[in-house]
Amino acid sequence: MLLLIFSTLFLFQFNEISLVPSVFNIININSSSVYFRPNVRSEHIQKPPLASPILTTEPTRSQGICNVNHAVLRVYMYDLPPEFHFGLMGWSRSGNQVWPDVRNRTQIPQYPGGLNLQHSMEYWLTLDLLSSNAPDVVRPCTVVRVPKPDQADIMFVPFFSSLSYNRFSKLRGEETVSVNNVLQDRLVEFLEGRDEWKRKKGKDHLIVSHHPNSMLTARTKLGSAMFILADFGRYPVEIANLNKDVIAPYKHIIKTTPASKSYTYEDRPILVYFQGAIYRKDGGAVRQELYYLLKDEKDVHFTFGSVGANGVSQAGRGMATSKFCLNIAGDTPSSNRLFDAIATHCVPVIISDDIELPFEDVLDYSTFCIFVRASDALKKDFLLNLLRGIKQDRWTKMWEKLKEVEKHFEYQFPSRPGDAVDMIWGAVSRKLSSYKNEIHRKNRYHKSQL
């Protein structure tokens, strides 16, 4: 008997391929297994295929540079002049320096605050790529920056397009063309002159254009590239669509509520919460109609609000003490309000028929959000009857799920496994896989007939 036990232990300890995956190598996202590849010798591991249906995340690096062969995504980043990125934030380089030293936090310029932060993912993604080659920065090894284009799966264009629009789209002084438009024209000229762009007509390039008004003059000429967007509300379908582009979450403005301090059902006296701009154009007209339907209900908070006069803090407290938070279409199908609700564990009620949601191929939003068609929401008493009919047990399950998924919507530096930055890279990888699958299928007979 002792001999049998020792033999079994010996096999489990030294066999290169374990019969049972270790529980330490598996976590769950939305009831799907997510495997962390173990630290094995490089000669025994191959680079995984892009866009695995199961979200794959590399182990967090503790020291040393990430192994390029182990990364899910290899990225080449153009060394654009600072006026396209950190220079827009007032950063001044030293000598021929193109990038700030990410190993020294004090040298990294802070992204402008307020509503600018909503569309700051261009900043977080660029920092993450820079830090992938910094041995002292602890981060996941999902993505690695490579020095040559022919080593890369995709080419990243580090233009801070949302910041450029927010801060430099208006004419200043004697300008006849805005800085924002000048930068876009220069970017188009640069990319169209590159062999890397010509090789696949830009289809293996990644451009962040999260603000709905960013890249207005360049998007048509660069529309073959993969975009990172908030939604498709202001794009023609031939320029932006779900087949090639990635939807990224807004960076929420309201502070995240710690799970241990999140109010339960009984401690949230407000049934429905909305605070923001009420009169909007296009699809946002539903906000105005809902306002008149709900404003006088005793357990509903539906008022105008802005970021000024302590508006963000007030909204944070209100959402944290509400059971349901309305996310209603505005000028575009999406808004930051959804991610504020997730951060405060207020069950989101999405009333936006054309909304596209980040990472929906790996996250089931129906487990932590309520979806209501706009036409139904505008029926008298429909919305309130629906929400009042949701019992405490069901609400609590959704509340627990919100606390579980909130990490996927957090932007931070350095990035962490499964946070918004890591999730975006995973989404890019899956889009690339679909694109490569299409190319390979087209090549089935073409090359055999050469």
Image: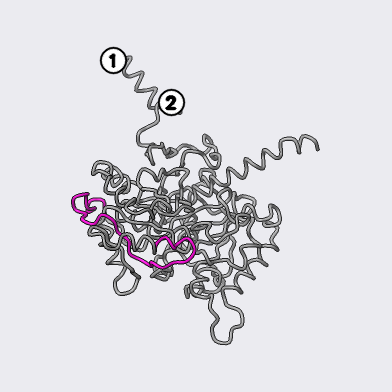
- Which type of secondary structure does the marked residue at label 1 adopt? helix
Q: Residue at x 39, y 64 (%)?
A: 288
Mark 2 element type? loop
Q: Residue 210's x, y, as percent? A: 50, 61
* Quadrant in which the C terminus is drawn: top right
Give how far across and how far down residue 330 sits, in percent.
44, 62
Residue 237 image-quadrant placement: bottom right
Q: Position of residue 427 (x, y in %)?
A: 50, 48
Position above or below: 403 against 215 = above
Residue pointed to by mark 2 = 15
The one of 127 and 207 positioned closer to us in this rendering? 207
Q: Is residue 297 visible?
A: yes
Q: Residue furthest bottom?
A: 174
Q: Is residue 394 left or right of residue 414?
A: left
Quadrant of res 59: top left
Q: Is residue 62 visible?
A: no
Which scheme is used to colour this image of the protein?
one colour
User: Which residue is most to the top?
Assistant: 1
Q: Which residue is mark 1?
A: 2
From which residue to which does the magenta span run?
258-287
The residue at 48%/58% (across/down) is 230
Instruction: From the viewer's side, name the closer residue of 108 and 43.
Output: 108
